[in-house]
Image (cartoon, rainbow, N blue to C red):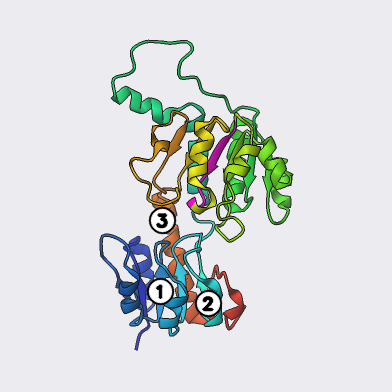
């Protein structure tokens, strides 16, 4: 009997093709949105393995009902929706899809930085509203980025690409704060490791590329915004839960910081009435960091590879809890 793989949303056909050719039976949720947890539980109980997305709640209750699962492949880099500790206790390996979306996500962070610095989203809307009448020398002024200081919070794969873009494009000075030193970033981009407080105090642009964890949840709040420069731009393309959105709104309204660019919001999706959408120096996107054909195809390929590799030889290409694998 072939193994059954449940894919919790429609993803690029590359994943289906690879799994089918490898002999798996593929079951796909084709609803217009994510499944409720009861729907997910019902279908997961019939599957051997799961390809999940960030909206799927794979918590302790899920694992208590689906301890039979043999492998989970997350169709994303982040996996904060998965209780990895519980999966590990059940000896279920979990994988993610790093690297394949680093360029796409860094491009969004880089684009948001430019858009915020010149108030592009707001000014585009002003044309639609018929407000572009004449040249006004002291109106709609932005800030230049050349030679400024970029602070990277989370100098991993995506943070490295963002540093590369900013160093090469604007000759920006690069600071970073990480759990561990990144010697490659220091060598390639002359990046300088600093404390978290120094990152806040010295960055003209602070770009967040960290995971969402107990340590980072709500880390960017009133206290941290108050430590930043008044001309600072805050960029978040990681997870909305990393920043406190009410505190961010207040910091922008009070001119504690200068601007913000978000590809992730808290909560998500953002309400159309959110005041951030009406601020001149704010640019918001609907979580499209990996939304390129190349990145999504790469994610589908890697998710399928992780499942195939697991059943082929007991390994996964990008396992986040490798201790449970038979070979590691």
Q: Looking at the image, can residue 125 be seen?
A: yes
Q: Looking at the image, can residue 107 be seen?
A: no
Q: Which residue is painted at 51% across and 69% down in the image? A: 95
Mark 1 neighbour density, 10 Å: few (under 14) some (14–19) many (20 or more) = many
Instruction: For the C terminus, give its image quadrant.
Output: bottom right
Q: Earlier in the sequence, mark 2 or mark 1?
A: 1
Q: Earlier in the sequence, mark 3 or mark 2?
A: 2
State the CA–CA distance, disc 3 to disc 2. 28 Å
Q: Label 3: which residue? A: 296
Tag 1–tag 3 contact (CB < 8 Å) = no
Provide the secondary structure element on which disc 2 rests.
Answer: helix
- Span colored in magenta: 232-240
Tag 2–tag 1 contact (CB < 8 Å) = no
Q: Label 1: which residue? A: 50
Q: Quadrant of residue 22?
A: bottom left
Q: Label 2: which residue? A: 86
Tag 3–tag 2 contact (CB < 8 Å) = no
Q: Earlier in the sequence, mark 1 or mark 3?
A: 1
Q: Is residue 141 magenta?
A: no
């Amino acid at each position: 009997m072939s193994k059954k793989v449940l894919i919790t949303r429609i993803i690029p056909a590359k994943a289906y093709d690879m799994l089918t050719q490898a002999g798996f039976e593929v079951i796909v949720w084709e609803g217009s949105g994510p499944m409720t947890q009861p729907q997910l539980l019902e279908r997961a109980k019939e599957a051997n393995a799961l390809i999940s997305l960030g909206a799927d709640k794979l918590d302790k209750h899920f694992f208590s009902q689906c301890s039979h699962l043999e492998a989970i492949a997350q169709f994303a880099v982040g996996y904060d929706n998965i209780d990895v500790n519980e999966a590990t206790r059940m000896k279920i390996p979990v994988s993610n899809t790093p690297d394949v979306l680093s360029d796409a996500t860094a491009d969004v962070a880089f684009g948001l930085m430019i858009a915020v610095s010149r108030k592009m989203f707001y000014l585009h809307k002003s044309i639609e509203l018929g407000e572009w009448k004449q040249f006004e020398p002291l109106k709609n002024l932005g800030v230049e980025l050349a030679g400024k200081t970029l602070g990277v919070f989370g100098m991993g794969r995506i943070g490295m690409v963002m540093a590369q873009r900013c160093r090469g494009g604007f000759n920006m000075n690069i600071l970073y704060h990480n759990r561990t030193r990144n010697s490659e970033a220091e060598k390639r981009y002359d990046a300088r490791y600093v404390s978290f407080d120094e990152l806040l105090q010295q960055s003209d642009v602070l770009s967040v590329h960290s995971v969402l964890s107990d340590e980072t949840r709500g880390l960017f709040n009133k206290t941290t915004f108050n430590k930043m420069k008044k001309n600072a731009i805050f960029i978040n393309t990681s997870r909305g839960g990393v920043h406190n959105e009410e505190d961010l709104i207040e910091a922008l309204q009070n001119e504690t910081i200068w601007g913000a660019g978000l590809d992730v919001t808290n909560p998500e999706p953002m309400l159309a009435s959110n005041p951030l959408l009406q601020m001149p120096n704010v640019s918001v996107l609907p979580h499209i960091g990996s939304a390129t054909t190349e990145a999504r195809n790469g994610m589908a390929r890697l998710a399928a590879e992780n499942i195939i590799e697991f059943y082929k030889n007991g390994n996964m290409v990008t396992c986040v809890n490798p201790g449970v694998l038979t070979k590691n």
